[in-house]
Image: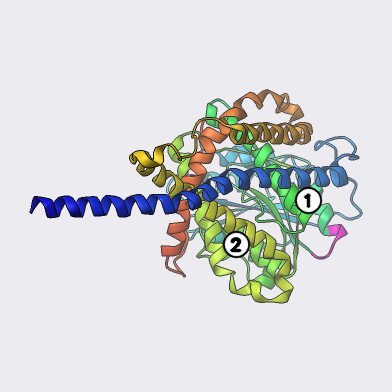
């Protein structure tokens, strides 16, 4: 009996050894892709951002505080969906009332808030005739709130911001000019800036929104299509929204969804870096995880829903963007697969010597150097929009933590969000959830 067990054990060890040996070439290929994919994309984003900068920003007079001259000033409706915004809504509306634009109204939507948001909005509406309040008795979700306000708005151009956002006084004019100049523009995404900068996560996000978010939006605009408008600051042409059926009520991220709906229908989305909007972001790991998991889920939901639409020849402009998004999800799952293989391989003596060196090598050093170059380029481009805060160069140091803190989080949230999107039942309404707003920066 013992000899039979020993023979079986030896046979299993031999088979396991063969599996590990067969896996090694594939693991080496996976490891190479894990390293070189972000390296390749970093240079793609940098190149695209530099093209955008040289075409639209290099010769621009002044900065975001400079008002552009418009040939026409059409009326504008500012939509603010609110859920439990009692702490922020007074400041948000107070800043909106200082807009340097001649004709605009403000529509605030109370979406079943559990605090005294409605009472505050009603009090403000009595003081300011420009403000109208819509009250939804139960939580219907941001998409429904925006849809309701859009249908009741008096203007063709709609500016959508969050209830904790502070819109720069010049932002409306900067966005409206694109609708005036090009009738095919369906939406304009603004340039969100981080308000809370008192913690490590807050400071890293200052650099992230410049080095990653801002750079990618510039590059995508240079290459023709934008993955998503910013949920906290975006402008829309009402007729374009009507053409695509407005926002979808069952998508976790309504901003990504409406971006794809508009572009698949033939509308164009522009990025306006001068349309500044100061926002609050999570400053706890749990809050950051929940936010990024929701973003990842929303992105995957869009890829699943609009895959059939890509077979139309008219949708060919979205093919590269769809492919890049799909590959980025695949990249995250490959990292998980590689991390699961490494400890198993380390337990096998015969594969220890052939296992790739996990210590810093020329590839990781090249990736780190590229990361710093990317941050440097983007912070240089974005510095003009942070003049009032002393510039973003002082946050360059904190960006060295980005690969450690954010790449690990983004890999995890991409996997979790993708799984949630696949398991989610279609048609289930997406409603508001309580989010981490971080520590307010004074």
Which of 375/43 is in front?
43
Tell me the residue at 57%/37% (across/down).
280
Label 1 neighbourhood size at 10 Å, few (<14), some (14-19), many (20+)? many
| Tag of residue 175 | 1
Query: Total of numbered circles in the picture?
Result: 2
Q: Is label 1 in a helix, a strand or a loop?
A: helix
Is 267 located above or below residue 230 in the figure? below
Left/right of residue 315 with respect to residue 203 in the rendered view: right
Tell me the residue at 83%/65% (across/down).
183
Q: Is residue 255 visible?
A: no
Q: Which residues are magenta?
A: 180-184
Q: Earlier in the sequence, mark 2 or mark 1?
A: 1
Q: Is residue 228 visible?
A: yes
Which quadrant holds the N terminus?
bottom left
In the rendered image, which quarter is residue 64 located in? top right
| Tag of residue 257 | 2
Figure colour scheme: rainbow
CA gap, disc 2 and disc 1: 21 Å
Left/right of residue 404 with respect to residue 318 in the rendered view: left
Q: Give the dominant element type of the magenta stretch: helix, strand or loop.
A: loop
Q: Residue 382 location, x and y as percent? A: 75, 35
| Tag of residue 94 | none
Q: Is label 2 in a helix, a strand or a loop?
A: helix
Tell me the residue at 33%/39% (across/down).
347
Outermost residue toward the left in this view: 1
Foreground: disc 2 or disc 1: 2
Residue 292 is inside the magenta segment? no
Is 410 located above or below residue 333 in the figure? above
Left/right of residue 403 with respect to residue 160 in the rendered view: left
């Amino acid at each position: 009996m013992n000899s039979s067990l020993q023979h079986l054990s030896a046979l299993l060890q031999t088979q396991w050894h063969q599996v590990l040996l067969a896996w090694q070439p594939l693991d080496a290929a996976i490891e190479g892709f894990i390293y070189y994919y972000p390296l390749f994309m970093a240079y793609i984003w940098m190149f695209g951002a530099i093209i955008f900068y040289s075409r639209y920003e290099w010769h621009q007079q002044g900065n975001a505080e400079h008002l552009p001259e418009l040939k026409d000033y059409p009326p504008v409706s500012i939509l603010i969906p609110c859920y439990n915004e009692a702490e922020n809504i007074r400041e948000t509306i107070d800043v909106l009332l200082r807009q340097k634009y001649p004709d605009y109204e403000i529509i605030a939507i109370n979406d079943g808030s559990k605090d005294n948001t409605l009472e505050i909005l009603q009090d403000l509406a009595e003081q300011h005739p420009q403000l109208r309040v819509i009250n939804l008795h139960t939580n219907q979700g941001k998409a429904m709130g925006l849809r309701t306000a859009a249908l009741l708005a008096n203007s063709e151009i709609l500016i959508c911001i969050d209830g904790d956002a502070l819109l720069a006084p010049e932002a409306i004019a900067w966005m409206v000019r694109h609708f005036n100049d090009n009738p095919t523009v369906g939406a304009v995404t603004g340039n969100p800036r981080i308000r809370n900068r008192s913690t490590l996560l807050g400071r890293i996000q200052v650099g992230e929104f410049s080095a990653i978010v801002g750079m990618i939006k510039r590059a995508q605009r240079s290459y023709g299509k934008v993955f998503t408008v910013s949920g906290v600051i975006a402008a829309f042409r009402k007729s374009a929204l009507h053409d695509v059926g407005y926002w979808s009520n069952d998508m976790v991220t309504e901003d990504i969804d409406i971006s794809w709906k508009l572009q698949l229908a033939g509308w164009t989305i522009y990025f306006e870096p001068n349309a500044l909007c100061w926002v609050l972001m999570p400053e706890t790991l749990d809050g950051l995880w929940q936010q990024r998991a929701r973003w990842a889920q929303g992105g995957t939901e869009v890829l699943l829903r609009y895959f059939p639409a890509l077979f139309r020849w008219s949708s060919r402009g979205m093919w590269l963007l769809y492919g890049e998004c799909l590959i980025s999800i695949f990249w995250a799952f490959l990292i998980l697969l590689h991390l699961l293989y490494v400890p198993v391989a380390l337990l096998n003596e015969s594969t220890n010597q052939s296992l790739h060196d996990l210590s810093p090598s020329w590839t990781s050093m090249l990736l780190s150097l590229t990361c710093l170059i990317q941050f440097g380029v983007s912070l240089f481009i974005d510095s003009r929009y942070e003049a009032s805060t002393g510039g973003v160069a002082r946050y360059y140091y904190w960006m060295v933590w980005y690969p450690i803190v954010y790449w690990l989080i983004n890999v995890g949230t991409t996997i979790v969000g993708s799984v949630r999107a696949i398991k989610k039942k279609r048609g289930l309404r997406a409603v508001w959830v309580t989010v981490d707003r971080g520590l307010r920066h004074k």
